[in-house]
Amino acid sequence: MTRRRPALAALAALAERRLVLWAAFALLHLWLGLVNLTSPSLPLGDVSWVYRGWIERAVYSDYWVGIHAEWVYPILALLPMLAAAVAGFEYYSSTWLTLVLALNAGAFALLTGVGRTGRNQGAAWWWLAFLALLGPIAIGRLDAVTVPLALVAVLWLRRRPAVAGVLLAVAAWMKVWPAALVLAAVVALRDRARVLVAAGVTSLLVLLIAQLYGSGLHVFSFLTTQADRGMQIEAPVATPWLWHALATGGTRIYYDTRILTFQVDGPGVGLAASLVTPALALAVLAVLWLGWRAFRAGAAGEELFPVLALALVVSLVAVNKVGSPQFVAWLAVPVLAGTLARARPFRVPAALTLMLAGLTQIVYPHLYGALLALHPLMLVALTMRNLLYFVLLAWAVRELWRLGARGAQEGSVLAGPSRNSEPALTLEP
């Protein structure tokens, strides 16, 4: 035991060195990029075929999704897809991976504290472990662009709330989920006005520019397109039908060529799919009420914000008829926010989220064919993953209730003056 302690101390000291952190960051992204480009399971297929196809059609035929036609994504999703074509369509996939690498590097630099002592190495190592467990999908979808933008916004919430609001709005106009972070900030933080105004003005500018380019109502088509889609096989709500398909064959899996996802069809699926969206709205409203209750009870903003953000983000994933594997990437932002706040240990959600990431990589991409074939072990892995979403949601809801029941006696660094010596959720150089 006595011999282990110096060895563990040496390992801890090594892990705290910034050079080691950055070496791990570079090696991890090199590995993730290599798997994306070479794996026979084609984890980068959406980027290489779907995103590239949209942009090729826009460039060569002047036909823009979201402007000339309905689109599944908000309009600013075109920006990273266009950026990936800057070196030519021949290098579209590798340019996409380079873009994500650059964005993650910027967020990682802020997370580790440029020009500071490395007091957040634990959070940085957690993020690297999370990316490794989630696998190639962590950088192979549009969500990989929004996550670092949202993380930077959260790190700047205290000192640069207006900039944070702009970043969150831009990210939300690429993929909707960062809007949950805006809602959490509006409820939990006393400086909510600057965040909300910045996000609102940014959204108005996006809508104005889209209308100038002739988008019309197509700019809102991502809302109706999502509402009309069927039930994706990976979604938690679809899990009983997958087991029904295995047991009786009464449910079938089919490929939706419009949405480009595998979905389920069977008895009661249509009714369940129609109920999920209002159920999601009710879940979000309930979580917001719990957050507002905690705020009114005096809960500290640095403790309330990450818990509320986590509850909202998990709700968007758990109570949803879409269950894309990249959705797990969203969870990194509120977990990192809670880890950095240090108001209360965030070990439980951090551990659960790592488990969610690992189970997701089992399901996708390498063994996805086995899931489509309804292999029992794959159904077990997917079921465990989907149940963990609700375990994580239950933890966050319980914490919100606890905060509302007792309040918080100390002032919040994010909400105003505090007795803490260091600012929370900000690692500016």
Image: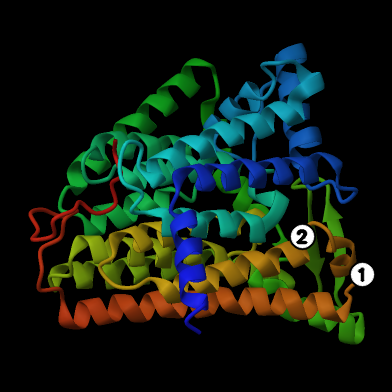
The percent position of residue 47, horizontal first and vertical second, equals 74, 36
How far apart marks 2 and 1 lie (CA) works out to 13 Å
Residue 231's quadrant in the figure?
A: bottom right
Q: Is residue 60 left or right of residue 250?
A: left
Residue shown at 37%/63% (left/top)? 339
Secondary structure of the residue carrying tag 1 is loop
Location of residue 80 with respect to 424 vertically, above or below: above
Residue 37 is situated, as x and y percent measured from the top left of the image, at: 81, 39
Q: Amino acid at mark 1?
A: Ala
Residue 377 in sight here: yes
Q: Which residue is mark 1?
A: 373
Residue position marked by numbered label 2 in the rendering:
364
Looking at the picture, how far across and down is residue 10, in whole percent? 48, 62
Q: Nearer the viewer, residue 34 or 278?
A: 34
Residue 217, relative to residue 64: is it above or below? Answer: below
Task: Give the side of residue 251 with respect to residue 100, left or right.
Answer: right
